[in-house]
Image (cartoon, rainbow, N blue to C red):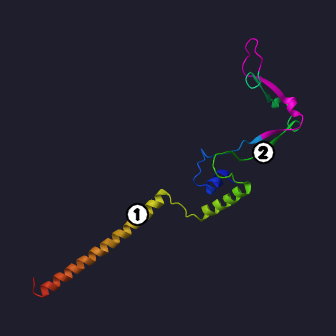
Amino acid sequence: MNIALAIKYLYPEADPMRDFMVQDNGPEPALRKGAEEKGRVRYEIKPTEEGEEPIEGVHYRYGIDYNLLTEGEDYDLVERGPHIAMWNLDKPQPTEAELQAAWTAYLEAEANKPPELTETEQLRADNAALLLELVQTQARQDQAEQDQAALLLSLVEGGVL
């Protein structure tokens, strides 16, 4: 399912660059119990001034170093798949079932939509329409000439000319 197209089907006025963002981070690590302390590492951000107490978030931060952990023992790689990472619409965020229904409806609408012509096919269709119009114009002109000749003949026979 393409979540972005399903959202655009539900909310056609939504702008995918401003109103919502669909993201797929690929496999992400999910820590098991007790692994956080084992892989916890302190990262220095900014050195402290003399006599200053270090403050977390300003001078240092804690993070997880997955090189210190073992996959399958301390953490698992979990595939979350595509998901809505940002939602800025005033309307409620659609559920998975609503997105699936919108995706199905979108696919049906696309299947029922007439195929778009290539540039060459479009030019051929336009050319055929112009040729038909030309033939019809020539037929009208021929008819007008015949009518004019018949009128002229009747005038000559009537002795007017």
Name the kind of residue labelled 2 in the image: Glu
Residue found 25% across the figure and 77% down from its top? 144
Residue in front for this viewpoint, 153 or 37: 37
**Mark linked to residue 31:** none
Query: Which numbered disc, 1 or 2, marks the residue closer to the eye?
Result: 2
Q: Give the x, y percent position of residue 95.
A: 72, 54
- Graded by Cα atoms within 10 Å as few (under 14), some (14 to 19) or many (20 or more), the crowding at tag 2 reads few
Q: CA distance from mark 1 to mark 2?
A: 53 Å
Magenta stretch?
28-54
- Graded by Cα atoms within 10 Å as few (under 14), some (14 to 19) or many (20 or more), the crowding at tag 1 reads few
Residue found 40% across the figure and 67% down from its top? 129
| Residue 66 horizontal side relative to residue 49, left or right | right
Question: Quarter of the image holding residue 48?
Answer: top right
Dividing the image into 4 quarters, which one contains the N terminus?
bottom right
Name the kind of residue labelled 1 in the image: Asn
Question: Quarter of the image holding residue 43?
Answer: top right
In the rendered view, tell whether residue 108 sits above or below residue 151: above
In the rendered view, tell whether residue 48 sits above or below residue 151: above
Q: Which residue is mark 2?
A: 79
Q: Which residue is mark 1?
A: 127
Secondary structure, mark 2, is strand
Q: Give the x, y percent position of residue 57.
A: 74, 26
Dividing the image into 4 quarters, which one contains the C terminus?
bottom left
Q: Give the x, y percent position of residue 133.
A: 36, 69
Secondary structure, mark 1, is helix
Q: Give the x, y percent position of residue 90.
A: 63, 50
| Residue 92 horizontal side relative to residue 122, left or right | right
| Residue 72 horizontal side relative to residue 25, left or right | right
Asked whether 116 falls inside the magenta stretch, the response is: no
**Disc 1, disc 2: CB below 8 Å?**
no
Q: Earlier in the sequence, mark 1 or mark 2?
A: 2
